[in-house]
Image: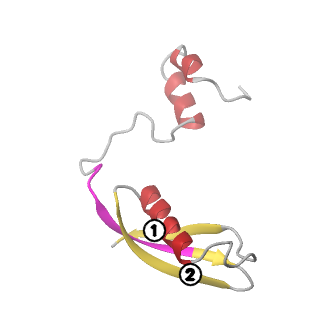
Amino acid sequence: MSEKPTLHEIAAMPFPASVQAMRKFYNPNWGMPVPDDAGDLRKFKVRVEYTYTESDSRTYTVEATTKEQAETIAEGMFDKDITVEDDPELGDIEATEVEDA
């Protein structure tokens, strides 16, 4: 299976092949138990690393339900602070070291 199967193709697969395909191509946590506190807002400290002529980082404290959402929010906050238009040499921006506050 070299191409990504459609959801209809995965639905037609027998168990456990369908679960394995969903985890491989769509969601690595598919069919796994959801934590009791899922959906509750928590505070995360997210360090956003960015590179231009030299490296630096900023830390934002955000409220989010997941680490991925916290990264997205922090990257948006960083985008408001510094934009590529302000500094054309600004490279790719990536959030790292997300931790519960």
Which element type, helix, strand or loop, lies under badge 1? strand
Q: Residue at x 55, y 17 (%)?
A: 8
Q: Which picture quadrant has residue 21?
A: top right
Tell me: residue 98, above or below residue 72.
below
Q: Which residue is mark 1?
A: 98
* Quadrant assignment for the N terminus: top right
Q: Residue at x 71, y 72 (%)?
A: 91
Which element type, helix, strand or loop, lies under badge 2? strand
- Foreground label between 1 and 2: 2
The amino acid on which the numbered mark 2 sits, given as a three-letter code, is Ser
Q: Residue at x 33, y 73 (%)?
A: 101
Q: Which mark is residue 20?
A: none
- Packing grade of label 2 (10 A; few <14, some 14-19, many >=20) is few
Tell me: residue 68, above or below residue 31.
below
In the image, taking residue 36 as reference, residue 82 lies left or right, namely: right
Count of number-bearing discs: 2
Q: Which residues are magenta?
A: 38-48
Q: Are marks 1 and 2 in contact (CB under 8 Å)?
A: no
Q: Which mark is residue 57?
A: 2
Q: Which picture quadrant has residue 42?
A: bottom left
